[in-house]
Every structure is written in C-alpha cells, then in structure tokens.
Amino acid sequence: MYNPFTLESKTILITGAGGGIGRATAVACAKMGATIVVTDINEVTLKETLDILNGECPKEHQMFAADLTNEEALDQLVKDIPALDGMVCNAGISKVLPIQFLNSDDMGRIVNINAFAPMYLTQKLYKKKKLNKGGSIVFTESISGVKMVSMGAVMYAVSKNALDAFMRNAALEFAVRNIRVNSVNPSRVNTNIVKNAVYSEEEVAKDIQTYPLKRYAEPEEIANAIIFLLSDASSYITGHALIIDGGKTLTC
Ligand SMILES: NC(=O)c1ccc[n+]([C@@H]2O[C@H](COP(=O)([O-])OP(=O)(O)OC[C@H]3O[C@@H](n4cnc5c(N)ncnc54)[C@H](O)[C@@H]3O)[C@@H](O)[C@H]2O)c1
C-alpha cells in the first residue's frame, strides 16, 4: 500500500524519551514500523517507555540511560548505539525567571541540556558516521524565542534560539551526505514541563483563550509532525522550523 510516511526499516534514536513528547514520539515511530533506540536521564521512566514499545510493537528496541550533559556519557551513548536513519533530539527543561534574577547556574543548566547537548550529540554522531546517508535529524525547539517571546522565558528562549541557529547550520553542512536537519517548534503541550511550571489554573485557562484552537497540543500531535520530518515524505525539506501552535503565532 502507498505510504510515503512509513518508517519501516529505519532505526531512530529519540532523546528525552522517558515521558511527554519523547515517549509519544517513540511509540508513534514504532507504530510506523521503526526500530527505536530511546535515551533519557531517568532510567525508571525510560524503562516504562521501552516496556510500552515492546508491548505495542515488539522489535529489537533498545534503551540507554544517560545524562546528555555529561560528555563521557555522550561518548558512551554514541559508541553503544547502532547506525541511525533518524534522530529526534528532544530532551529539554524549562524554568521561568525574569531577567533581573538571571544566574549562571540556572542559565548553564538550561543551555547545556537544551542547546549544547543536542549540538554535541549531533556532532559526535556525524563524526563517527553513525548517521546513515539519507538520514533525518529533528530537534524539538519551541515557538519561544524563535517566533515569539513571553515574560520570564528568557533562558528557555535563548537556549531554543541557539538550537535553531545550529539546526540551520547543520542542515547546510550535512546536505553533502544527504542528511536532512529540521525542527518542530511547538507552543504549549500537555506534558510535565507545563504541568510542573509555575502557572496557576486561572493563568492557564486565560492563556488557552489566546490560542485560535482554544487548547494546548497533545504530545501525539507533535509526534505526528516528527514522523513526517523523519520519513521520506519530507525528502526535500531541510533547514525548516515547523511551527505547531494551534494558530497561536498568527497574530504575533
Ligand atoms: N511541553 C511543552 O509545552 C513544550 C513546548 C515546546 C517545546 N517543548 C520541548 O519539548 C521537549 C520535550 O519536553 P516535554 O514537554 O515532553 O517535557 P518532559 O519533561 O515530559 O520531557 C523531557 C525529558 O527530558 C529528559 N531530560 C531532562 N534532562 C535530561 C538530561 N540532562 N539528559 C537526558 N535527558 C534529560 C527528562 O527526564 C524528560 O523525560 C523539550 O525539549 C521541550 O523544551 C515542550
């Protein structure tokens, strides 16, 4: 049957796969036929994801727990994993803090995991030729910083903007090996990052009204866009930031 979105015979690495968008992406990619390699700093939730994968779409899926901000752990991960046809660099954190309270600890933590870790992971995989020709890399960026700004989101915005610059540079440099590099840029998604944030129920209810579609995204809706960018259906798309925001930035 004609299906340009299939991930059959592709091996795909997904970081931050212990929950939220990463777990939804791992499950969705497995359902599209991929063999999945998952990684996360949280071994317990990562194992839960692997169990879901093995339960719903059994294959040779693998998990490797790793703190992606630790260079040795990154090297070990690159050594351990098989050659990849796709990678979703998705692990990330957030913290709301106005500029007057900025400090190097928080800034370092956020930029390290959101920007430097995916940059160095990508570099190491490319150098070690662990990304097959014709492969596809997808970064989970955000509308924050890249498309709009909001109060207190400066550290997060800086980190995602840095990643966006890297994404476009990598798209240019990796084209010679026919490796495509793109990003998905969601607005708020119903995951722990939003649940654990400091917003009150009233703030969330008010914020949702600013979205033309009047709701936040579900992780599976981001996963479906990632499938498109990983699949051969997007074979001529590289260096593109795909906004997924229920219309939020239409009026920005
Ligand atoms: N939820 C949203 O509203 C939203 C919006 C736009 C972009 N994003 C981005 O989506 C990505 C996924 O976030 P989510 O919403 O699914 O949140 P989440 O908290 O459910 O998932 C993030 C995952 O990253 C892992 N992680 C954190 N630090 C790590 C480290 N040092 N090494 C390895 N893994 C680490 C966490 O354990 C967690 O499983 C993030 O990059 C986030 O910035 C989220």
Image: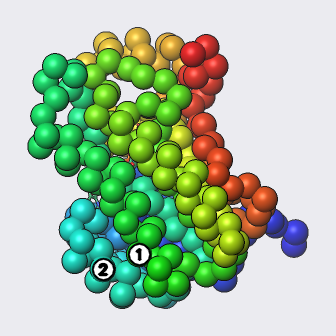
Residue 158 appears in the rendering = yes
Left or right of residue 75: residue 215: right
Amino acid residing under circle 2:
Asp
Q: Classify the position of the N terminus by image quarter.
A: bottom right
Task: Residue 155 in the image: state x and y as whole percent.
Answer: 28, 34
Tell me the kind of residue under disc 1: Lys
Is 130 in front, or is 34? Answer: 130
The image shows residue 192, relative to residue 45, as above or below, that is: above
Query: Picture coordinates of residue 247 (x, y %)?
Result: 62, 24
| Front-most of residues 8 and 173 | 173
Secondary structure state at the residue bearing disc 2: helix
Q: Quadrant of the C terminus?
A: top right
Side of 38 relative to 73 (left or right): right
Few, some or many residues within 10 Å of mark 1 (<14, 14–19, 20+): some
Question: Badge 2 is on which residue?
Answer: 75
Secondary structure under badge 1? helix
